[in-house]
Amino acid sequence: MKIGIRDGCLQQPWPGAFEVAARIGFDGLELDLGADYEETMLWHADGRRELHNLISGSGVELASFCAGVCWTYSPASDDAAVRARIRQMLATTCAHSADFGVKWILVPVTPGEEGVTHETGTQRWIEMMANLAPVAAAHGVMLCLENVGRGYGKSAAELAHLVDTVQSPGLGVYYDVGNALYFGNDPVAEIEFLGDRTGEVHIKEFGADLLGDGAVAIPQCLAALRALGYDDWLILETNPTADPEAAARYNLKALRGLLG
């Protein structure tokens, strides 16, 4: 398995994140596309050329993109214009991901506005993913739904419902072991339940900044992933602390030690 880290964990803009990730020894980076996604390198031809240069110059791969913009523009929104905007954003991200050889896009299953019921929000997510999953698959990309709070995918069962209803190679799960424990779920059991629905994995603790200091049974989670034949990215989403580089270095060493 390869190990990457989210850019936010390094508290650096994209160029700096590549520099620090290379210095520490990470295999890859996950880059967040927030509400300002149209201002990022990915959204402009010159920026994409610069991003290619950062990758080749640093030796750090681009592991995945995170559509953090879904916290601002949710597919569950009552506003049809908001739903259309995020649909176009995700479709465009699929195309750009293919250009960079990125196979996974993290999509947090975010809620709509106050008043949107769980049933309605879930159905809107299903409709959006049914529309986008074939687009992703055509680009060789998988949209991976993450178990996050304030949404419709906190548990493995909810994520499986979304993915199984759509049934497309362009849609899978982005599983976060720390979030799972925070929600009161057993991450080992959920990893086993999700099986090959899982496209990518976030590693972090619950109740601590550094791996090994919290409550997540990370060695058992890794064993469960291996038992399923998982051999893709493990992305650190750890607390940057007051010294992001030192924390990232410690967590990388700890995770590599667990992998053996």
Image (spheres, rainbow, N blue to C red):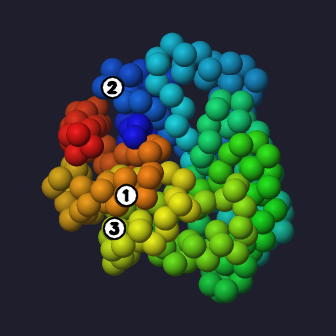
Q: CA distance from mark 1 to mark 3?
A: 11 Å
Q: Which residue is mark 1?
A: 227
Residue 250 against residue 230 in the figure, above or below: above
Residue at the far top: name it: 57
Residue 212 lies, in percent from the top left, at 17, 53
Q: Earlier in the sequence, mark 1 or mark 2?
A: 2
Q: Using the image as rendered, state which of residue 77 and residue 162 is in the foreground.
A: 162
- The residue lying at 46 percent from left, 60 percent from top is 175
Asked which secondary structure carries label 1, the reply is helix
Q: Earlier in the sequence, mark 2 or mark 3?
A: 2
- Amino acid bearing label 2: Gly
Q: Earlier in the sequence, mark 1 or mark 3?
A: 3
- Amino acid bearing label 1: Ala
Q: Quadrant of the N terminus?
A: top left
Q: Which residue is mark 3?
A: 188
User: Residue 231 falls in which quadrant of the image?
Assistant: top left
- The residue lying at 83 percent from left, 68 percent from top is 80
Asked which secondary structure carries label 2, the reply is loop
Of circles 1 and 2, which is in front?
1
Residue 211 against residue 25 in the figure, above or below: below
Residue 98 lies, in percent from the top left, at 71, 36
Q: Which residue is mark 2?
A: 25
- The residue lying at 31 percent from left, 49 percent from top is 239
Of circles 1 and 3, which is in front?
1
Asked which secondary structure carries label 3, the reply is helix
Residue 231 against residue 190 in the figure, above or below: above
| Mark 2 closeness class: few <14, some 14–19, many ≥20 residues within 10 Å | some
The answer to whether any part of residue 112 appears in the image is no
Q: CA distance from mark 1 to mark 2?
A: 27 Å
- Amino acid bearing label 3: Val
Residue at the far left: name it: 213
